[in-house]
Image (tube, grey):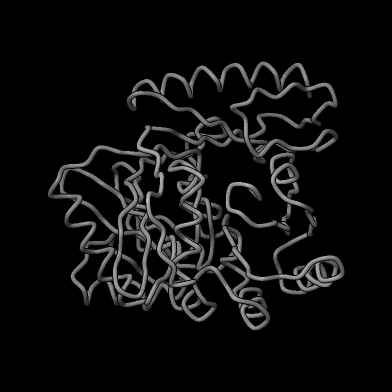
């Protein structure tokens, strides 16, 4: 990554996987993204490096105070803690959707389930963790939402002070290898096909919400699509998993927004691709002799231990069309499953 974006990179991460170690000058592994853990890691970074700016990704939904600490010390290439908190305020979010006349599932903040056909969602979460049909099993506070039978989708977009550019629409799915009845994020495919009218309506919703929250940089909007139209679920005010499906130079575009810089001839990938998480189907330890294929990313270091249901690594697939990508993804999943069974 250092050579790709023209600067040195130091990473602070909970996993410190092989990929991260290869692209960063140095990786500092932390127990969590809570402010005390991040502050301690930053103190270590400062002993050897001068920090010019901070780029953050997923995992901070429950730790806006961490973003607050970081932005007080250095330039932030991402939405501020204030914006992050405002987006996480679900009561305000759904009031805003109603005010802007943007379709969304019926939502309830009642203590108990409104009845059949509703699911429970945590106030702050990512990757479908904690979403359930039973509040007690979630173990956290949250809200209820009418379940929509349809296709889970997202749209990746770039916001600046003056404009919003849609990068691409994506299809998402849950991790069925763990259970048919869970909401865990399983994977995402780029360049999803949508009717022109639907694209226009979703793009207009993105523009309205971006202006209301004053979003900056790369963000995503999650929505459900069925025969009756689309229903907005949430905004992720940060770089998401779908960003890697559109080329590494997209990060340059994200950073340029915060530096008021212009980038010409940026190469955004137009090739259909997909990213899928591989979860452990049994308890396992990664052996030292495991030879990872080059299409495996987020590769754990040898000796890493995983329990059933924990994410081990991810698969990337590309092709000429969505069907070819899906076939390649299924084929690679089978290959990797065999490797893991023999190498764990």
Q: How many marks?
A: 0
Q: Residue furthest left?
A: 197
Between 102 and 300, the one nearer to me in the picture: 300
Residue 328: image location, x then y, percent:
46, 20
Q: Position of residue 281 (x, y in %)?
A: 66, 29
Quarter location, residue 201: bottom left
Q: Residue at x 65, y 57 (%)?
A: 7
Q: In the picture, residue 290 is in which quadrant?
A: top right
Q: Is residue 287 left or right of residue 240?
A: right
As rendered, which of 170 and 107 lies closer to the eye?
A: 170
On the image, the x and y values in percent for residue 106 come to 28, 63
Please indicate whether residue 78 sits to the left or right of residue 53 in the image: left
Q: Vertical placement of 155 versus 87: above or below?
A: above
* Residue 272 found in image quarter: top left
Of 294 and 286, the residue lying toward us: 294
Residue drawn where x is 42% and y is 70% of the image: 216
Relative to 107, say whether 249 is above or below: above
Q: Which residue is located at x 61 percent, y 78 percent?
A: 71
Q: Is residue 274 above or below residue 208?
A: above
Q: Which image quarter is the C terminus in?
A: top right
Q: Where does the image place residue 123, in percent across and percent down from the top left?
A: 50, 68
- Look at 71% across and 22% down and name the residue there: 340
């Amino acid at each position: 990554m250092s050579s790709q974006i023209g600067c040195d990179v130091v990473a602070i991460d909970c996993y410190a996987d092989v990929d991260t170690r290869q692209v960063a000058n140095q990786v500092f592994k932390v127990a969590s993204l809570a402010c005390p853990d991040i502050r301690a890691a930053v103190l270590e970074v400062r002993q050897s490096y001068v920090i010019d700016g901070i780029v953050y990704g997923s995992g901070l939904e429950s730790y806006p105070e961490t973003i607050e600490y970081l932005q007080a010390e250095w330039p932030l290439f991402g939405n501020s803690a204030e914006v992050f908190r405002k987006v996480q305020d679900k009561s305000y979010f759904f009031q805003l959707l109603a005010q802007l006349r943007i379709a969304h599932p019926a939502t309830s903040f009642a203590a108990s389930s409104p009845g059949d056909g509703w699911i429970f969602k945590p106030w702050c979460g990512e990757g479908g963790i904690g979403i359930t049909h039973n509040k007690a099993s979630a173990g956290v506070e949250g809200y209820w939402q009418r379940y929509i039978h349809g296709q889970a989708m997202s749209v990746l977009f770039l916001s600046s002070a003056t404009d919003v550019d849609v990068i691409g629409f994506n299809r998402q799915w849950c991790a069925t290898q763990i259970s048919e009845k869970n909401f865990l994020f399983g994977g995402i495919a780029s360049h999803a096909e949508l009717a022109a009218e639907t694209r226009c309506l979703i793009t207009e919703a993105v523009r309205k919400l971006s202006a209301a929250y004053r979003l900056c940089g790369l963000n995503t909007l999650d929505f459900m699509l069925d025969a009756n139209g689309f229903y907005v679920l949430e905004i992720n005010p940060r770089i998401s998993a779908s960003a890697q499906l559109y080329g590494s130079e997209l990060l340059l575009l994200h950073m340029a927004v915060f530096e008021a810089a212009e980038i010409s001839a940026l190469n955004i990938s137009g090739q259909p691709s997909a990213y899928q998480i591989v979860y452990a189907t049994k308890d396992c330890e990664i052996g030292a002799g495991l030879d990872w294929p080059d299409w495996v990313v987020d590769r754990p270091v040898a000796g890493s231990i995983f329990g059933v249901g924990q994410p081990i690594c991810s698969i990337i697939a590309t092709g000429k069309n969505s069907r070819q990508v899906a076939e390649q993804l299924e084929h690679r999943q089978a290959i990797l499953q065999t490797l893991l069974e023999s190498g764990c």
